[in-house]
Image: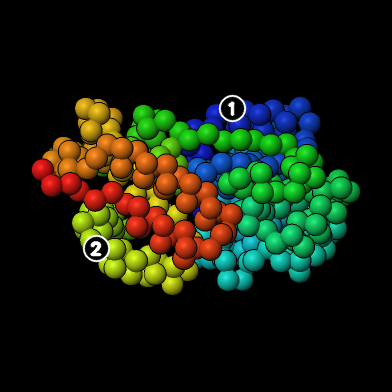
Amino acid sequence: MAEGPVVGHQWAVELLRNSIKHDRLRHAYLFVGAAQLGKSTLARHFAQSLLCTKADAGRACGACRSCRLQEAGSHPDFILAPPTDRQGQPDRENGLHRAEQAADIIRQALLHPMEGRYKVFLIQDAHRAHTNFSNKLLKTLEEPPPHVVLCLTAQDRSVLLPTIVSRCQVLALRPLGARMMEEALQARWGVAPQQAALLARLANGCPGWAVDQLSQPEPLAERSERLAELQELSRSSRVARLAFAQKLTAARNQTRLFSLLGLWTGWWRDVMLAQSGCLEQCANVDLLDTLADTAGDYRRDDVQAYLRTLSRVEGYLRHTVNTGLALDVLLLQMPRPQAR
Ligand SMILES: [Zn+2]
């Protein structure tokens, strides 16, 4: 996969650059933060700087053979685990972080680099790893061959083995400001100002999400549909709500589920803001009229309680409780508009 530029996270970029420049590399780095925040992108750039044969003060030259290979996603000393699918998303079917995969990493780590001084491994979504995988990986972390640098990404460090975390330099990435993202979308992706403003507000600080929308045939069309569906659901009967929960559960698509929950959270937060007279702070800037019209239909207490429920249920789902049960609760508790 060709990589995009790093947006934001300047302190982390500097820290990594300095560690190369002053030859103070650690054997393992853990990039922690929300999905699509830029963890893997940052790790890939770090890898490029490490592998670059003409790096200057920890900065990749962008032109040498090594840089070109890395930018094309085909550097033999950069190893991705699990493998990604064509869209660059971790391939969940074939890459389940099982013990065999850890064994494969260990075996590859023992081999010398083919091009330069280092072999860099990127282990994405380490929070999803099987315990057997983590235990095996730990062995490599305990006695890593000198040419090996491991980069791990995870959304939540608390679910990783503490012994793994303690062996890594942890880089806790924070969501980006909307202003920075808006500028980056315009400057680096050539997005029109109005769309950049909307995407930056909706992205919740995660540039990867905004950039993903650009590759959709009709950016944001899916979002409009999902938001219309949400408003429909809030007016629906218990039976219809439970049927929707069942459909979501049966789809067994975690990525879509969390993206839907993120969308719902954004919407209800906007309803709360509209109710508090802070319409200008809403994220869904293209739907301000709808928000202004409908926010008053809901009880404020219901909306606030529901935002807490959303956050709680999302936490449960990340730690895999009974998905069906959690979604039933979520749908049944959704606020219903009151008669005016
Ligand atoms: Zn280079």
Mark 2 within 8 Å of ligand 1, using the beta carbon: no
Q: Residues within 10 Å of mark 2 (few under 14, many from 20)?
A: few
Secondary element at tag 1: helix
- Amino acid type indicated by mark 1: Trp
* Quadrant where the C terminus is found in the figure: top left
- Residue 38 vs residue 239: left or right? right
Count the marks: 2
Looking at the picture, the colour scheme in use is rainbow
Q: Residues within 10 Å of mark 1 (few under 14, many from 20)?
A: few
- Amino acid type indicated by mark 2: Ser
Q: Is residue 45 visible?
A: no
At a point 61% along the width and 41% down the height, the residue shown is: 32
Mark 1 near mark 2, Cβ–Cβ under 8 Å? Answer: no
Q: Which residue is mark 2?
A: 237
At a point 52% along the width and 59% down the height, the residue shown is: 89
Q: CA distance from mark 1 to mark 2?
A: 50 Å
Q: Is residue 242 visible?
A: yes
Question: In x, y percent, where is residue 78?
Answer: 68, 54
At a point 23% along the width and 33% down the height, the residue shown is: 275
In the depicted structure, whether residue 159 falls above or below residue 100: above
At a point 77% along the width and 35% down the height, the residue shown is: 25
Q: Which residue is mark 1?
A: 11
Question: In x, y percent, where is residue 138?
Answer: 81, 52
Asked which quadrant contains residue 84, the reply is: bottom right
